[in-house]
Amino acid sequence: MRFWSKEAMLAVGAVAAAAAIGFVFTGNAAAQQAPPKGPIAGTTFKNVNTASLKDLTVDDFLGAMGVMAAALGYDCADCHPGAGSDRVDWVIDTPKKVRARKMVDMVATINRTFFAGAQMVTCFTCHHGKDLPVTTIALDKSYGPPNEETRDAIVAAQGAPPATQILDKYIQALGGAQRLAAASAAATPAAWPVSQHCGISRRKEWLDGSHEMRRPATSSPSMSRGTRRP
């Protein structure tokens, strides 16, 4: 029997990614004091030195990378030469990586200074899937139909039950919290033996240090932007 629908798995993945990116962009003191659940990015990888990123767990760090890339309409190869091939260079400091570190620190400072650490500003706040943020208003849109983008915060309808009550009923319908906890253990990244994300052949290689981070000796057509793995 399947306990997790595709939609439920996508929802859990989105929440996990949002939580990771929220940690990055808020710099919440209480969150930073909590002990990490697993290896952390700053000690597992050779070149993660941004204050907001280095204390993330490996899984949260990779999730944050994915959210940040999507916010700019990028893929891994835009910042990491050769990503998606066997000539990937994760260590080299490209101009985009250097700029990204500064932007991550900037956004974390804004949230910490002006929003008491709440995640109010992210990469997507300005970029909206573009590498360069749009700073001018398109007049044909200004006087046209209303903006289709909706707020992130969903306000409960009048007379509707609270979200906790809805979620409790949903969990019970799936078999209860205990049953879901057992099912979710098999759905975590730690239980996946193989990953093809950005040319990484096995997740275990990231954790035991057996992977080799090397600079590419020669360029290759396969290193161009757009080389992606599912």
Image: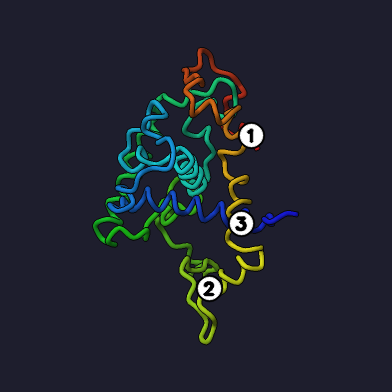
| Mark 2 or mark 1, earlier in chain | 2
Q: CA distance from mark 2 to mark 1?
A: 37 Å
Q: CA distance from mark 1 to mark 3?
A: 30 Å
| Mark 2 or mark 3, earlier in chain | 2
Q: Quadrant of residue 61?
A: top left
Q: Is residue 55 above or below residue 182?
A: above
- Residue nearer the viewer, 207 or 112: 207
- Are the residues at dot 2 and dot 3 in contact (C-beta closer than 8 Å)? no
Kindly identify which numbered label has been placed on residue 146.
Answer: 2
Q: Nearer the viewer, mark 2 or mark 3?
A: 3
Residue at the image point whose x is 54% and y is 38% from the top: 75
Residue 159 position in % (x across, y down) = 53, 87
- Residue nearer the viewer, 148 or 183: 183
Residue at the image point whose x is 55% and y is 68% from the top: 148
**Mark 3 packing: few (<14 Cα in 10 Å), some, or many (20+)?**
some
Q: CA distance from mark 2 to mark 3?
A: 41 Å
- Mark 2 lies on a secondary structure that is loop
Kindly identify which numbered label has been placed on residue 180.
Answer: 3
Residue at the image point whose x is 27% and y is 61% from the top: 116
- Residue nearer the viewer, 178 or 34: 178
**Mark 1 packing: few (<14 Cα in 10 Å), some, or many (20+)?**
some
- Mark 3 lies on a secondary structure that is helix
Residue 76 position in % (x across, y down) = 52, 35
Residue 52 position in % (x across, y down) = 33, 43
- Considering every residue shown, the one lying at the far top of the view is 217
**Mark 2 packing: few (<14 Cα in 10 Å), some, or many (20+)?**
few
Q: Nearer the viewer, mark 2 or mark 1?
A: 1
Query: Mark 1 — residue?
Result: 229
Residue at the image point whose x is 38% and y is 39% from the top: 100
Q: Nearer the viewer, mark 1 or mark 3?
A: 3
